[in-house]
Image (tube, coloured by chain):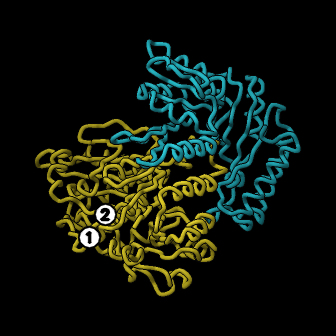
Chain colours: A cyan, B yellow
Amino acid sequence: MFRQLRAHMARRWPGTLVLAACQRAPRDPRPESGLDWIRLPPGDSLELDRELVGFMGGMFDCRAALFVGAQALAMVGAAGLGPRIAVLPRRPADEQGVDHVVVAKGKEWLAQIDQLLVRTVPVELFCRPDHSPQDVLQMLAAHPLGMRAHELVLNWQGVADERLGEILHLLRQRTRARVLVDLFLSELFDVPRAWLVPSVGDVFLHPRAWRQLAGFGGLLFRAPGNTRFQLSSDSPRAWVRAGVAAFNSSLALLGRGRP
Amino acid sequence: MNLLVVAIDGKGLGHLARTLSLARSLALVRTDVRTTFLVESPAFGMVQRSGFNYAKIPDPRHPLGLHALRGRRSEFETGVLERLFDTLTPDAVMFDFLVDKRLFLSLQRRNCRIVVVKRKLRARVAKQLAADSAAALVDAWLVPHDESEFKQGEIPERLLRRCHFSGPVVRGANLSRVAELRARYLGEGKKLVLVTAGGGGWPQAQRIVRRAHQAVASLLAKRPELRAVVVWGPLNPTGFPPEADGLRVLRDEPEMPELMAAADVIVSNAGYNTVGELLRSGTPGVVVPVTETGRDDQEERALAAQAQGRVVVSADEPAQIADRVAALFDGLGPGKVPPVPDDDPGKPGRVLSEILGT
């Protein structure tokens, strides 16, 4: 059941991160695109397992949780997860805590899971400035939802420039999706980086950085109404994180922040 | 004693391979230490195969985890690790390589020793590290080098006081397996070229493997006595070229030290573990360093290995790599010698044991 589901997710949901939580990981796991594992040390309490899975689900912005097999139902109580979908060989006597049950029999059960996921999982696209607007449309078309997507997350890996603007306008014309553009602080400025984070000197003393920031300001002003933005940074430094949070709050005040 | 090992690896295998070697060495000298790995890397099968207990946590650097975590990586790492510390109650935690003030303060409150494995860094990076307030909270830096590898003043004084030099920490080959590896990949009377660049997750490593692949493919066309194995790396997200006559393409070879000892020439990058394993294998090598800025200096490492007379350095140009490999087969450079035995496999373990105390 789990193996079939893994293969199905890789085939039908490219671009979606699937976290598989197991007590017993496969004997020789191979890195697979789209799949990552959680394996908790054996012998620990179920409460800790639930807490950790909930914490990780919350951090990873988990939009749906599939509980595969009867034993997995013990984890249904984990917080921070999206709709809970039990995938079982037969209908359980007790469906408490479960939002949907999919009986893994016949040919239709994987299609049923797709139907449930379509409602909650956004389409994620990873784009760079060397992608043309047509490239981005092709990426979207390759997704099972394609142009019918209701929510798009556009991970922009570069400077927020005219190219991003063109892509956003084309998406507005061709889809009805809400678009969230995720920008990464260290990629927003095409200037040399320091060790862990771009330092103030690296970024803000560089004239090109100011031009790029002004370009982002213009983009905010001209972007289609369905578009929202958020800034991200992996900096461990508190002042950088505080700055990013303040910037995102400002975006929200302008009506352009993450909903 | 309860030791947790936090090995941060998502693109390469270096941190994981090094800490596994350290844990194995420690197990030779201490039976009272229970070692548990906390792993992010998709290559956690390495720990699984080693028999150590482990927890696998999601990799915040997973290419598809970008949206969810690229703004919250440090929050995630400290949050999930703190929850695991609550349950696993470590007496000591060894990081390779994570320096995080919030996490370290939390460990101090638990009276837990903090050990960080610190391989040789570029001078600029070492200086930045020394200035980081989190670095002051580290109880001991385990440096997997001999002290003689450093110039006077190369390690900032602030770090040097707490440095413990273990000598190189490198996986050695199981010599009883070498003949089988050679038979698996090689016909009789043939010569074997091996291409490897560690985990293969870094774009620079991918470029080196791609170009070395082109180089050996062109060489095979001219030299029918050659066979080649190109290991693209278990973390390489790109597709691989198809196999050709005499050229095997692998994603991963768990017995890499043994395959290195079985080969006649190795083409590799200049990562810490790769160069260490290459030098120990006794097989001559063509080393192609990554020249872009990284935390460690691959060019310096490659040139140091060349000075030992066991490898030649090449730029990442297919023609130059092919020339260097051909020259080694023609006897114009270092030849194959028996693998270098590890005379004291417990040495790094003893250094770590001293750091941990009783």
Read off the residue under disc 1.
B345
Describe residue A189's horizontal placement relative to residue B247 as left or right. right
Describe residue A100's horizontal placement relative to residue B291 as left or right. right
Read off the residue under disc 2.
B24
> Vertically, is B142 above or below A227?
below
Residue at image coords 70%, 53%:
A185
- Indicate which disc, 1 or 2, sits on the residue closer to the N terminus: 2
> Closer to the observer: label 1 or label 2?
2
Q: Residues within 10 Å of mark 2 (few under 14, many from 20)?
A: some
Describe residue A233's horizontal placement relative to residue A253 as left or right. left
> Vertically, is B77 above or below B293?
above
- Name the kind of residue labelled 1 in the image: Pro
In the rendering, at what x and y percent does residue B277 appear? 30, 63
> Vertically, is B277 above or below A42?
below
From the viewer's side, name the closer residue of B77 and A70.
A70
Image quadrant where one finds the N terminus of chain B: bottom left
From the viewer's side, name the closer residue of B211 and A153.
A153
Residue at image coords 63%, 29%:
A83
Report helix, strand or loop for mark 2: helix
- Name the chain letter of the residue that bears numbered label 2: B
Looking at the image, the residue that sits furthest to the bottom is B152
In the rendering, at what x and y percent does residue A77 appear? 58, 36
Contact flag, marks 1 and 2 (Cβ < 8 Å):
yes
- Name the chain letter of the residue that bears numbered label 1: B
Residue at image coords 17%, 59%:
B175
Which quadrant of the structure image shows residue B136? bottom right
Image quadrant where one finds the C terminus of chain B: bottom left
Q: Can residue B233 be seen in this view?
A: no
Which quadrant of the structure image shows residue A60? top right
Looking at the image, the residue that sits furthest to the front is A93
